[in-house]
Amino acid sequence: IVRPFNEIPGLWKNGVANLYNFWKLDGFRNLHRIMLQNFNTFGPIYREKIGYYESVNIINPEDAAILFKAEGHYPKRLKVEAWTSYRDFRNRKYGVLLKNGEDWRSNRVILNKEVISPKVLENFVPLLDEVGEDFVARVHKKITRSGQNKWTTDLSQELFKYALESVSSVLYGERLGLMLDYIDPEAQHFINCITVMFKTTSPMLYIPPGLLRRIGAKVWRDHVDAWDGIFNQADRCIHNIYRQLRQETGTPKKYPGVLASLLMLDKLSIEDIKASITELMAGGVDTTSITLLWTLYELARHPNLQEELRAEVAAARAESQGDMLEMLKRIPLVKGALKETLRLHPVAVSLQRYIAEDIIIQNYHIPAGTLVQLGLYAMGRDPQVFFRPEHYQPSRWLRTETHYFRSLGFGFGPRQCLGRRIAEAEMQIFLIHMLENFRVEKQRNVEVQSTFELILLPEKPIILTLKPL
Ligand code: HEM
Ligand code: 2DC
């Protein structure tokens, strides 16, 4: 017999008291650990209310399958009110990230063709390969300058630049020049703004931004400044391309980038295009760079695995005579490594949907309209789901274990990450070039944990040493 919604275990009766306890536990930065602990206390399903944020949380892949089958035609994630409030406040259009319903679907279908369909990969790969080569050249230069035949550093700023350069080259078909010694201060400002934007979002998941705005709270003001910086920089890039396109006559020979393709296609309004391009540009920096940093960290901790990956890349290079598109088809272990990184260090602590129909999970009835969250971080570390979850083992993604609803780092279905193809190609190409040129080592044996700043980030700097092979 199915049990009613109100019997789901958890703390959901007093949102304000729960918010107070959450705050005491420093929950704004520990969300992932608190979720893990809640699953330990309540089992594979629990209900929760913190401030005004109410949800049902699940952890099992089989339950995730039920959730995504009930997502409906217009899948809807948790509404991040800080982001919609900013756009309402500044009178800016929502892009695909924030749109819902038919407006979301019609925009998403057109964007899919230009951003995530398999056929665009051949356009992206040469652009991304060039950025990868420039990154390697930059590291070689740093190593030479150090005079020690190695470079020891916190790579995060370098990786932010690599990621912004990569996503920009694909979106605009042009280089920003971030792999050079002197970089445009505006670009550096854009990078800083993204970090601040994410960081200031997390408290506003639980305290309504409208309220914070009325009382003139600092988080809200910092959040607005951060988005202003993001939009200003994106507007400049977009305007540049728009102007070039209007001056050009005839059709260009080479691939002109996602933005120019969308403008020429003429199926979305300019305002819709601007809104989504800005989101793609902002979404393409911290996500891939942090995932790459975690991957280098894991490879530094597992030197034998690092050699195995290097051998795979060398064989792939030989078999494909350097054709990068071909190479990407011959590196299953490198792809497994990226999946393994996202399992242990996911960018998104959870996936969520407002379900479109009633469902039954763990024998509890859950009514349509409920916000259901899959605890992605908790699932990745659950020994019931992954054999020896604490082991970083890329080969588990090759054959041996079942993958059913287990590889969800980019989300699922029609609402999954729009930047997925860009992110995957960019990260694979980065690892290929790094493995071909450098050995990655780590100083001492320090474990680095995650901290929640809307996305999960390393809680302290990761210091790595790069040595030429
Ligand atoms: C959405 C993860 C990189 C742009 C998402 C979602 C996840 C995610 C989990 C929500 C999916 C869902 O609800 O099912 C990641 C990870 C990345 C990454 C792990 C890299 C390691 C990127 C990049 C871009 C991007 C590089 C831009 C080029 C977006 C956009 C959405 C999204 C626009 C919203 C799509 C929509 O609502 O239709 N991402 N992402 N992401 N991501 Fe990413
Ligand atoms: C954060 O409880 C934790 O890809 C919340 O590229 C639930 C939640 C909702 C939406 C998620 C967010 C979490 C993490 C960051 C995500 C976001 C959807 C898209 C965004 C996963 C899990 C991200 C990083 C996008 C960001 C695009 C940019 C323009 C802001």
Image (spheres, rainbow, N blue to C red):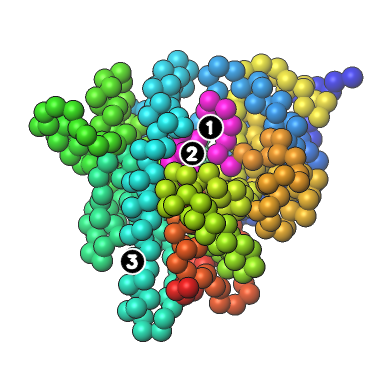
Beta carbon at label 3 within 8 Å of ligand 1: no
Horizontal and vertical percent position of residue 437: 45, 67
Beta carbon at label 2 within 8 Å of ligand 1: yes
Q: Residues within 10 Å of mark 2 (few under 14, many from 20)?
A: some
Q: Is residue 385 above or below residue 304?
A: above
Question: Considering the numbered disc 2 on the image, is that residue within a helix, a strand or a loop?
Answer: helix
Question: Considering the numbered disc 3 on the image, is that residue within a helix, a strand or a loop?
Answer: helix
Name the disc covering residue 138, or none: 3
Q: Report the amino acid beneath label 2.
A: Arg
Q: Is 421 within the magenta?
A: yes
* Residue at numbered disc 1: 416
Is disc 1 in contact with disc 2, using a CB cutoff of under 8 Å?
Answer: yes
* 377 vs 314, nearest the viewer: 314
Q: Residues within 10 Å of mark 1 (few under 14, many from 20)?
A: some
Query: Label 2, label 3: how many angstroms apart (C-alpha)?
Result: 26 Å
Query: Label 1, label 2: how many angstroms apart (C-alpha)?
Result: 8 Å
